Amino acid sequence: MTVEKYLKPEVINQIKRLDLRAQFVAKGFLQGLHASPFHGFSVEFSEHRRYAAGDDPKDIDWLVYAKTDKYYVKKFEAETNITGYLVMDLSRSMGYTYRQELTKFDYAICLAAALCYLMIYQQDPVGLLTFDQKVRDSLAPRSRRTQLGNLLSLLARLKPEGQTDIGHSLIQIAAMLRHRSLVMLFSDLLTDPEPVIQALRVLRHGGHDVILFHILDEAEVRFPFDGVVEFEDPETAEKVQVDASQCRDHYLADMEAFRETYRRECFQTRIDYVPLDTSTQFDKALMEYLVSRRNRF
């Protein structure tokens, strides 16, 4: 099986254990980096520094010791990286899928798990925040290997069940974060954009870096419907019948305008906007994460 096949959502769905999914995606992605300009990026060697109490003896460079009779450790770029938070939208609309193997929420959880694996691999502290109408779960960031199990265990138990207030929740999160952080938000953003955009600006004003993973179902992006179709709002249960053929062009134009609003606003506020749908291979999102980090550090 090629690396590209590892990264397809329908392949990942065959793996039921989230920890194995995360390793499968992240390792497949890292394998694919070997032939790219990002080879070695995850723990790029920077310089040596004198060994100090508390340093891991495994990081001692024994070749340097043999030449100088002094203990030096390898310093990695990862030592200067900032703390990351995975921020998950628990709204009921995230549980939707039309014909893909993964719901939007399944896709977001798998992507978040792979990013967690990647960050721990890079020795980065990573934590987790979840929200619907307010912040629900909070796991403090750590960079130890045990954090991977703790975070994946929490991710695996999450369910998209509530109504959501993204703007209010992001304002809450901005108030909770005491230090400059990398905020990775996973949401379908199916709400009024203005309060969300205002909240994203508050996060940026607080000095935080933000990556916005805008995750939609493949059918929400492409509208593969014909004839009279009944749609139901997953959060209000309101139903409406439409002639799909007549409204397709209008819907697709509105969807493009919706995404363009976020693309434009995020560009202006220096937020990384990553539009995805549930048919997109995970390596696109993971590469966006690495590119954003490389641009910052």
Image (cartoon, rainbow, N blue to C red):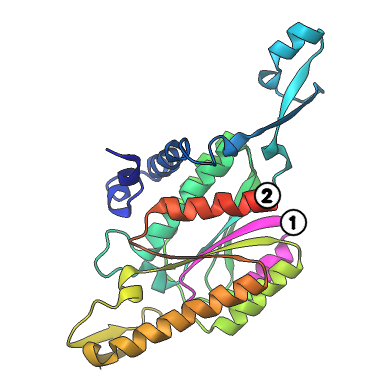
| Amino acid type, label 1 | Arg
Report the residue marked by disc 1: 180
Mark 1 lies on a secondary structure that is loop
Residue 271 in picture, x, y percent from top left:
63, 66
What distance separates the C-alpha of mark 2 from that of mark 1? Answer: 7 Å
Q: Is residue 18 shown left or right of residue 13?
A: right
Q: Residues within 10 Å of mark 2 (few under 14, many from 20)?
A: some
Q: Is residue 13 shown left or right of residue 273?
A: left
As drawn, 143 above or below 208: above
Residue 95 in picture, x, y percent from top left:
36, 67
Mark 2 lies on a secondary structure that is strand
- Please report the residue visible at 61 percent of the width from the left and 54 percent of the height from the top: 292
Report the residue marked by disc 2: 83
- Please report the residue visible at 68 percent of the width from the left and 49 percent of the height from the top: 83
Residue 251 in picture, x, y percent from top left:
35, 86
Chain part drawn in magenta: 170-190
As drawn, 148 above or below 53: below
Q: Nearer the viewer, residue 207 or 294?
A: 294
Is disc 2 in contact with disc 1, using a CB cutoff of under 8 Å?
A: yes
Q: Is residue 203 shown left or right of residue 284?
A: right
As drawn, 260 above or below 186: below
- Please report the residue visible at 63 percent of the width from the left and 34 percent of the height from the top: 44
| Amino acid type, label 2 | Thr
- Please report the residue visible at 30 percent of the width from the left and 45 percent of the height from the top: 5
**Is residue 253 highlighted in magenta?**
no
